[in-house]
Image (cartoon, coloured by chain):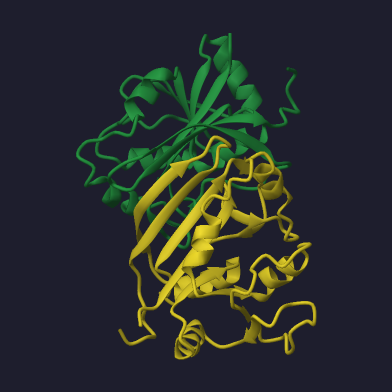
Chain colours: A yellow, B green
């Protein structure tokens, strides 16, 4: 099996995925005039076996009117949540542990391609050298503050641009492959 | 006269213009394989009447082997530097004051289009509502820490994508026009 972890996310031009309170009003507002364009979201979702997200992102998703992931397995990382809220489908599981432990466990269940979501979780997986690909859609707005996509690293991560596409609404979507990263804690 | 302030800068994918110590080795290294491509730098430089930069950027430029700006006027913002180092050309002047005061003074001298450079200075001009255009070249590397291009704002700044271009080396250059910003301290 070939482990493959990807990020697919939108940020403000100054690198935030949400306002300080988690609000994504700026993203919803920017997306409202995009005529149903999904920016490759469905195709990306279809390409993964499961989502891996942190508790903050999970709680944000719970605030949406509808569960957006169908029956796609969703793995929520949390050391504090103990039981799944009744309102969410059976496809959701809670787990904890290091990024390595988590992907190993999921691979032992037959899954190998993962959509890693949420700032904290993406940063943990990047630091663990587990992210292979990042698709980042830049929204043309500066927020000034918020929850950053990226965070501290132990060393540089070199990327290769796979594709770049701009949309009439002003979004620019860049897809990068990680070409050099330290996967120090994991045997190759 | 029509005041026009532009930014033309490169950042890492995580939004840094330099490492914490000011080093741009990552940028020099990324640019070294680009076969003399200047990414529109000369054309941009030719389009402005003067550069406005902060002291940090100025000191960085002084560390370069050659003065890169020819006889283009360079205005260095500093409240601490009192005299121009002997090694720099007469085209360099030192000044201080608010962004509004500075551009008013320069306009009274017949200049109207400015290249605003350096993280702190760009942030000050953005907060003052004085930036009209930003051209940002995204370098495909994550640094994890450094001197950020953007900083806190009093309110969102909405942008319009003017153009987006990707280069074989993996750089993506996006040009934005500021469409909504508060130029509160300045009569329109």
Q: Is B118 situated left or right of A119 in this image?
A: left
The quarter of the picture where the N terminus of chain A appears is: bottom left
Looking at the image, the residue that sits furthest to the left is B35
Q: Is A22 situated left or right of B125 in this image?
A: right
Q: Position of residue B46 (x, y in %)?
A: 37, 19
Count the marks: how many? 0
The answer to which of A79 and A164 lies nearer the viewer is A164
The quarter of the picture where the C terminus of chain A appears is: bottom left
Q: Is B168 situated left or right of A168 in this image?
A: left
Q: Position of residue A136 (x, y in %)?
A: 50, 54
Residue drawn at (60%, 59%) of the image: A148
Q: Is residue B47 visible?
A: yes
Q: Position of residue A84 (x, y in %)?
A: 74, 84
The answer to which of B106 and A154 lies nearer the viewer is A154
Q: Position of residue A20 (x, y in %)?
A: 72, 58
Q: Is residue B98 visible?
A: no
Name above or below for residue B149 compared with residue A97.
above
The answer to which of A130 and A142 lies nearer the viewer is A130
């Amino acid at each position: 099996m070939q482990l493959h972890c990807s990020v697919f996310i939108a940020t403000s031009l100054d690198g935030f995925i949400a306002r300080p309170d988690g609000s994504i009003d700026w993203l919803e507002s920017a997306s409202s005039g995009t005529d149903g364009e999904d920016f490759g979201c469905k195709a990306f979702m279809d390409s993964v076996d499961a989502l891996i997200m942190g508790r903050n992102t999970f709680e944000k998703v719970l605030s949406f009117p509808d569960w957006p992931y169908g029956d796609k397995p969703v793995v929520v990382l949390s050391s504090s949540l103990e039981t799944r809220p009744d309102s969410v489908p059976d496809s959701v599981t809670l787990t904890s542990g290091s990024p390595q432990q988590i992907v190993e466990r999921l691979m032992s269940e037959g899954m190998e391609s993962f959509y890693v979501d949420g700032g904290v979780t993406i940063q943990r997986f990047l630091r663990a050298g587990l992210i292979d690909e990042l698709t980042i859609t830049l929204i043309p707005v500066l927020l000034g503050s918020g929850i950053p996509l990226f965070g501290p690293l132990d060393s540089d991560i070199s990327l290769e641009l796979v594709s770049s596409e701009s949309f009439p609404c002003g979004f620019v979507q860049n897809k990068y492959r990680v070409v050099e990263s330290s996967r120090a804690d994991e045997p190759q």
